[in-house]
Amino acid sequence: MGINNMIQDIEPFKFKNEYKEKEPVANDFIYMLRGNETLIKKSESGSYTLPLYSDFDKISTLVYLFEINSHSVFYCQDIEKFTVRWNVALFFERFEFQFIRFPRWLQFVCVTAKHLVAWYQSNKYCGCCGNLTNYKNSERALYCSHCGNVIYPIISPVVIVGVIDKDKLLLTQYAHSDFKEHGLIAGYVEIGETLEEAVRREVKEEVGLKVKNIRYFGSQPWGVNHILIAGFFADLDGENHICLDPKELSTGRWFDKKELPRELSDISITYEMIETFRNSK
């Protein structure tokens, strides 16, 4: 049983992702993405948030994304053509800034908005014929009027696995990544695989172990990488000798509950799975 504290656990805020045709109003959020930077607003009190539609004197080319409580969120396509009210402080900041400054519900807004905006930006042209794509008014999709190709947002499935050997949990570290903390085995689901088959394959490929008793834990949308993570626990099947894939991992080690590190942000499914094992009887 999880602790329900991941980035998508935003109650009492309500997230509504149904597509609709809508014009912005004063208290709607405006999301701008420039490379890996997001437009941020700093209030007179020193707090940070996303800018509102009312913060701009002039802004255009807005695309509706979704709703969060009483706010709609719009994506501004043309980040060079807007003017800001004289008393509003806006600036571009690296995307990771939000995890330090924003409350949980607004972190989720940014992660989900980035998922959609990155999809819009990478599908400006049709992948079949190379012509410009257009927005469909009836649903969240792009289409090509030249060849009829319809493009929907990409959601890639990923599995993450907590491998258990009696009272120990297997933690690993990536070999070539800026992310240095310990985590669980994870990887993309391949064509034609079930989630359970992906669990077995990833564990075998990355640490040379076999697993059994695969059981579903929970899931997490992670818009930064347009993925949906499915979490599983599995029991070791056979010997516990670890044989690392050096192209993927730098370390792999069995930890008992008292040794488990506390390195991760509590917004991730990895953190929730490790804490669930730590607190299990």
Image: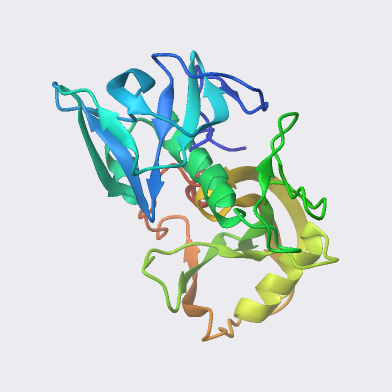
Residue 267 x, y percent position in the rendering: 45, 42
Which color mode does the image show? rainbow
- Please indicate whether residue 202 sits to the left or right of residue 25 in the image: right
Residue 177 rendering spot, x and y as whole percentages: 41, 72
Task: Give the camera-side residue of 107 and 65.
Answer: 65
- Height in image: 255 above or below 2? below
Between residues 275 and 83, which one lies in front from this camera angle? 83
For the N terminus, give its image quadrant: top right
Q: Position of residue 12 (x, y in %)?
A: 50, 16
The correct choice, above or below, for 256 with respect to 76 in the image is below
Q: Residue at x 37, y 43 (%)?
A: 79
Residue 271 visible here:
yes
Observer able to see residue 276: no
Q: Which of 165 and 69 is in front in this view?
A: 69
Q: Which residue lies furthest to the right in this view?
A: 192
In the rendered view, would you say 40 is above or below 167?
above
Quadrant of the snapshot with the C terminus: top right
User: Where residue 23 sits in the image (x, y, percent)?
Assistant: 53, 18
Q: Is residue 27 above or below residue 222?
A: above
